[in-house]
Image (spheres, rainbow, N blue to C red):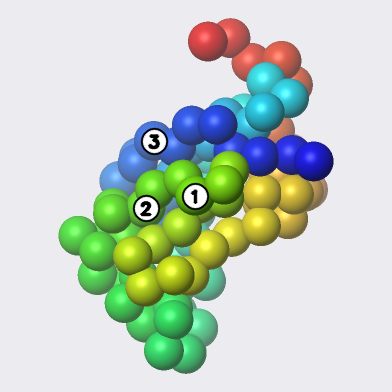
Amino acid sequence: MIKVSRIEWLGGHRLSFRFSDDSAGEYDFAALVRESGPMIEPLRDIDYFRRVFLEFGAPTWPNGFDIAPDWLQLEIEAAGALQRHAAA
């Protein structure tokens, strides 16, 4: 089971991730935060978005919204941005 082991805010709605298998990549959540819904709308505020933390290996925000690590890794890989065995 893949987990996120580290998150870094890169500005705007972009985050950098390191996964439990030592792969790494970046993801831009700009399209996601344009969606409607009570769990997503708070993430539009950059200060709130930056409050992301790891809970059981999943990126999570204070309102309980989280992202499945395996989905995130697949999205990053599909964009051609996944680095396998990234340097520390």
Q: Residue furthest top?
A: 87
Distance Cα–Cα, label 1 vs label 2 = 10 Å
The N terminus, quarter of image: top right
Q: Residue furthest bottom?
A: 37
- Position above or below: 80 against 62: above
Label 3 is placed on what type of residue?
A: Glu
Q: Residue at x 25, y 64 (%)?
A: 48
Left/right placement of residue 18 relative to residue 39 reads: right
User: Residue 22's spot in the image, x, y percent?
Assistant: 67, 20
Q: Residue furthest left?
A: 47
Mark nearer the viewer, 1 or 3: 1
User: Residue 39's spot in the image, x, y percent?
Assistant: 44, 81
Label 2 is placed on what type of residue?
A: Val
Sequence-first disc among 3 and 2: 3
Left/right placement of residue 78 relative to residue 16 reads: right
Q: Residue at x 28, y 53 (%)?
A: 50
Q: Which residue is mark 3?
A: 8
Numbered label attached to residue 55: 1
Mark nearer the viewer, 1 or 2: 1
Within the image, what quadrant is residue 76 found in?
top right
Numbered label attached to residue 52: 2
Within the image, what quadrant is residue 13 found in?
bottom left
Q: Residue furthest front?
A: 56
Label 1 is placed on what type of residue?
A: Glu
- Position above or below: 9 against 87: below
